[in-house]
Image (spheres, grey):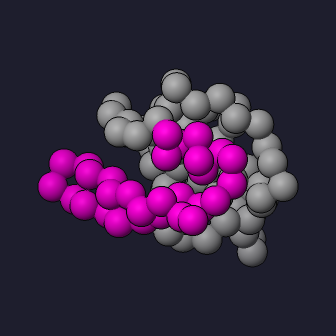
Amino acid sequence: MPTEIVIVIDDLRLNGYLGDSPTAQALADALPIEGRARLWGEEIYFPVDRVVAELDDTAAVVVNVGDLGYWPTGRALCIFFGLTPGSVPGGRWFIYSH
């Protein structure tokens, strides 16, 4: 069952959810997560040092605006809201695990 979450950035509140994958459950178990957000193009990511997860069968290369994902290499929760430096026409090349 998905876990509903709220992401607070200054005065901005974003509602979202984490899916049912083992990675999403590990993120849910690590809540609350606090830290400094970083940008990569039009993506916000938050380091999540307490979660170490590998790619699983839910990983995707192309993501949609508004998707949440986990970046294993950077151990970070990502919010996708536009193009990144790795973007290509028709989609983004980025690892996503929901």
Q: Which residue lies furthest to the right in this view?
A: 57
Residue 60 shown left or right of residue 72 in the figure: right
Q: Which of 50 and 46 is in front in this view?
A: 50
Residue at 50% across / 68% down in the picture? 66
The magenta stretch spans residue 7: yes
Residue 8 shown left or right of residue 2 in the figure: left
The answer to whether one can see residue 10 in this image is: yes
Residue at 73% across / 50% down in the picture? 95
Residue 12 shown left or right of residue 82 in the figure: left
On the rendered image, what quadrant is the C terminus found in?
Answer: bottom right
The magenta stretch spans residue 9: yes
Snapshot quadrant of residue 61? bottom right
Residue at 59% across / 61% down in the picture? 19
Q: Residue furthest left?
A: 11
Please give the range of residues in magenta. Answer: 1-29
The location of residue 25, given as percent across then percent down, is 59, 47
Q: Which of 27 and 48 is in front in this view?
A: 27
Q: Which of 69 and 31 is in front in this view?
A: 31
In the displayed structure, 42 sits above or below 31; it is below
In the displayed structure, 67 sits above or below 74; it is below
Q: Nearer the viewer, residue 93 or 55?
A: 55
The location of residue 63, given as percent across then percent down, is 67, 65
In the displayed structure, 79 sits above or below 27; it is below
The location of residue 78, given as percent across then percent down, is 53, 49
Residue at 33% across / 34% down in the picture? 34
